Amino acid sequence: MKHLLSAIPLLFFLASCGVASPSTPGSSSSELTIEAYPLSEAPQAESTQVPFSDTVAGDPLLEHADQRSRIFPVASCGQKVQMGFCITLGSDQLAAWEDYSNPASGLVIVSRNDEEIYRIPIGEASPIPALRGLWVYDDHWMLETVYVNNEQDGNEISSWAVGQITLDGELLNDRYGYDEAFGLQTIHGRPFYFYQEDGKIDANYDGVAINLGYDEIPHYNCCSASTLNPMIAQNMVAFFARQGSDWYYVEIGAFDQP
């Protein structure tokens, strides 16, 4: 994904799942419900209004407002690891942080009980945060990072950002041949993420693919454009998506779970 910056930086499984039509609200499976609502136009950064189509009845934003408000606490590390995340896995303490001691070839490093267990290249330093999240479930850990290449033309910098997801030290992009993987979180305690393959974006929940068939899901945007990024909560994710020339507001979640 290409992100354009000005000279002043402005950026930013084993469950049963069904296949949902992007234009059909309320598609469901035994684990997740997928609700997609058509928009009359592309969503705009900083706008306080979602441009729902006239065919949409009521206000979909009210349906799961309580679920959307249940966000995750920030898993920061305080002073021990600057600009990183810390999380507990069983009795162990995991930490992840960025290392740009070589600005042209950065790394994200993961430690377990202060002992390094993993490192992954993240490319060049840029206004795009390369460390996106460190997650645990059962006895597993997962990591989302971004690999960045920068190109400068006059006072404009183009940053090419590719999402990467690692499970227990194995890069899932390589295992499954993803072009990109992003949006890692847990939903009701199980891992969820988006992935792009052959130009289409689908999702994976607890190891099972969910056929979404989108051409674009805005992500990795910052500042004013961050309003277009997926919004994650403990039991759901809300996001904008494009299929062809049509845009949708989509919510995927375990809405019937406490």
Image: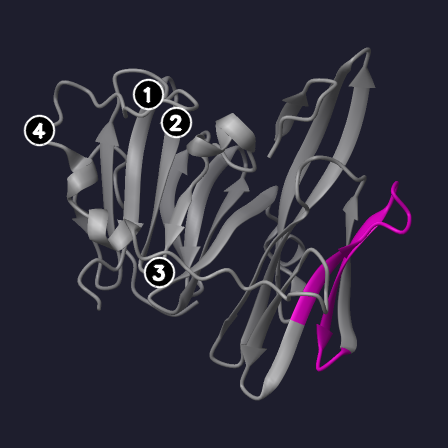
Instruction: Give the dominant element type of the magenta stretch: helix, strand or loop.
Output: strand
Q: Earlier in the sequence, mark 1 or mark 4?
A: 4
Q: What stretch is highlighted in magenta?
A: 95-114
**Where is residue 10 drawn, in percent x and y?**
63, 26
Q: Where, quadrant-wise, is the C terminus in this rendering?
A: bottom left
Nearer the camera: disc 3 or disc 4: 3
Q: Are marks 2 and 4 in contact (CB under 8 Å)?
A: no
Outermost residue toward the left in this view? 57
Q: What residue type is labelled 2?
A: Arg
Q: Mark 2 points at which residue?
A: 242
Q: Where, quadrant-wise, is the N terminus in this rendering?
A: top right
Nearer the camera: disc 3 or disc 1: 3
Q: Residue 234 carries which label?
A: 3
Q: Name the residue under label 1.
A: 246
Q: Mark 4 points at which residue?
A: 57
Outermost residue toward the right in this view? 102
Outermost residue toward the front in this view? 79
Q: Earlier in the sequence, mark 3 or mark 1?
A: 3
Q: Which amino acid does label 3 sit on?
A: Gln
Q: Which amino acid does label 1 sit on?
A: Asp
Q: Are marks 1 and 2 in contact (CB under 8 Å)?
A: yes
- Secondary structure of the residue carrying tag 3 is loop
**Magenta-span inclusion, residue 81:** no
**Magenta-span inclusion, residue 110:** yes
Q: What residue type is labelled 4?
A: Ala
Per the model, the C-alpha gap separating discs 1 and 2 is 6 Å
The answer to whether 12 appears left or right of 225 in the picture is right
- Secondary structure of the residue carrying tag 1 is strand
Q: Is residue 75 above or below residue 202?
A: below
